[in-house]
Every structure is written in structure tokens, then in C-alpha cells.
Image (spheres, grey):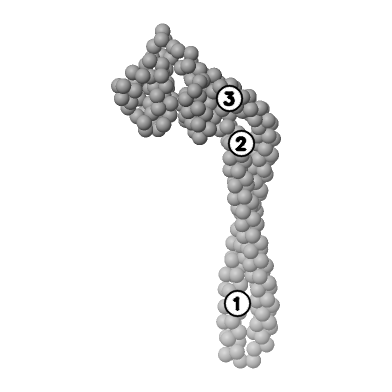
Amino acid sequence: MSDEVQRMRHLHSLLKQKAEVEAHLERGPRLLKQLSAQIDLARKALSDAKEEVLQKKIEADRKQLQLREREGKLLHHQAQLNAAKSNREFQIMKDQIAADHQANSVLSDEILELLEAIDGLGSLVKERATKLNELENELARTEKSVAEKKLALSENRTRLEMDIHDAIEGFLGEVKANLKRLISARGEESLAELNGTSCGGCNTQLTAQVRDRIDMNHAMTCPSCGRLVYKPESLNPFA
């Protein structure tokens, strides 16, 4: 294989490595953003659960106050019953007391349901608080890991950028100028190996004339995606 095609293969390899490093650099902030969004949702869920507990407690307190007031009225009606001066007055008080007992029973059941709901919500609050704490701890660990990896990845990217610059300088004339323009605009996607009879970047079928030129160790521009297509090593190891 010609020296130029070997250099192009090496350059493409460097570009792929740089793209991978940049993908890792982007993955860290993206992961942190996702975790932060999850934490925001967890905080909202915890806040909603606490608010629901508060509202249930307010409602339970209101009903308990109402029950105490009704029990006071019941005692008053009982006194009126004992002081009744006629059968009609006695029956009216008796019916009122029965209605009071029924209403108080319903109110007591409602209070009990509220207290049971508050207990259940208390468990939900604890569960959501635990989940929030776990996410916050995960975020702290991830922030530390991302910061540690960022330094090494940034140094690796700088080294690769220097290697890519040196590799480009190994080309001459129009090929060098074309590579500089393409790599500046498209990075890793500026080059592609020939894949059978197609561009290895976009899978467009290339003409026989273009493939013949590639087989003769000339990089050719793909008419579809604009990549420089070069001869793969496996095509002819003795060229």
C-alpha cells in the first residue's frame, strides 16, 4: 500500500480516537444533567408527599375539633332529654340524640381514615426522602468521577490534536489542503475506507471508475457525502 494511503489510514485512526475522547468528555456533563433532572423530580415528589401529609393533618384536626364540638352538643341534648316536660319534647330530644350519635360515628370513621392515610403517606415520605438522598450521593460521586476523568481526557485530546496536525502536515499540495478543510469542518467524518464497492461512510455505491482510482492508491471524494474514500488495507495487502 502506498505511503499516502497508509498516512491517511493513520490519520483516520487518530480522528476516530479524538472523536471517542470527545464523546467521553460530552458524556460526563450529559450524565450530570440527567442526574440533576432526576434529583429535581425526586425533590418535587418529596415536597408533594409532605404537602399531602400536611393537608391530611389539617383536615384531620378540623374534623377532630368538629367531633369535640358535636360531642359537647350531644351532652347538651342529653341534658335536655332528661329535663323534658312532655312526651313530645322527650321524643324530639331522643331523635336528635340518635342523629347526633350517627353523625359522630360517621365523623369518627372519617377521622380514622385520615389518620390511616397520614400513616401511609409518612412511609411514602420516608421512601422518597431515601430516594432523594441516594440520588444526591450518586450525583456527588459522579461529579468527582467526571472531574477526575476530564483532566486525563483533555490531556489525551490535546495529544491527539497535535498528532493529527503532524499527520496532516505529512501530506502534500491539494490533498493536504483538502484534508485541512474537511477535517476542520467534519472531523472524523472527513474520511472513510472503501467498503466493498461502496463508501464506508454513507454506503453509497461508487462507480467503477472511482473504485479503480481508489485501487490505484488515490483517495477519491464520495459524490454523496463528500468524504475522502481511501483503499482499505484488506483490499490488497501487497499494493
Q: Residue at position x 57%, y 86% from top? A: 91
The extreme left residue here reads 208
Percent position of residue 64, x then y: 66, 69
Q: Which residue is mark 2?
A: 28
Asked whether disc 3 touches disc 2, contact meaning CB atoms under 8 Å apart, the reply is no
Tell me the number on the disc at residue 100: 1
Q: Residues within 10 Å of mark 1 (few under 14, many from 20)?
A: some
The residues bearing labels 3 and 2 have C-alpha atoms spaced at a distance of: 27 Å
When the figure is inspected, residue 69 is found, relative to residue 43, above or below; the finding is below
Q: Could you say which is closer to the camera, residue 79 or residue 170?
A: 170
The N terminus sits in image quarter: top left
Percent position of residue 198, x then y: 35, 25
The extreme top residue here reads 238
What's the amino acid at mark 1?
Answer: Asp
Helix, strand or loop status at disc 2? helix
Say how many tags the image has: 3
Q: Could you say which is closer to the camera, residue 60 or residue 235?
A: 235
Horizontal placement of 123 versus 175: left or right?
A: right
Helix, strand or loop status at disc 3? helix
Q: Is residue 134 visible?
A: no
Asked whether disc 1 touches disc 2, contact meaning CB atoms under 8 Å apart, the reply is no
What's the amino acid at mark 3?
Answer: His
Tell me the number on the disc at residue 165: 3
The residues bearing labels 3 and 1 have C-alpha atoms spaced at a distance of: 92 Å
Helix, strand or loop status at disc 1? helix
Decide which of tag 3 and tag 2 comes sooner along the chain: 2
Q: Is residue 77 visible?
A: yes
The residues bearing labels 1 and 2 have C-alpha atoms spaced at a distance of: 66 Å
Percent position of residue 12, x then y: 50, 23
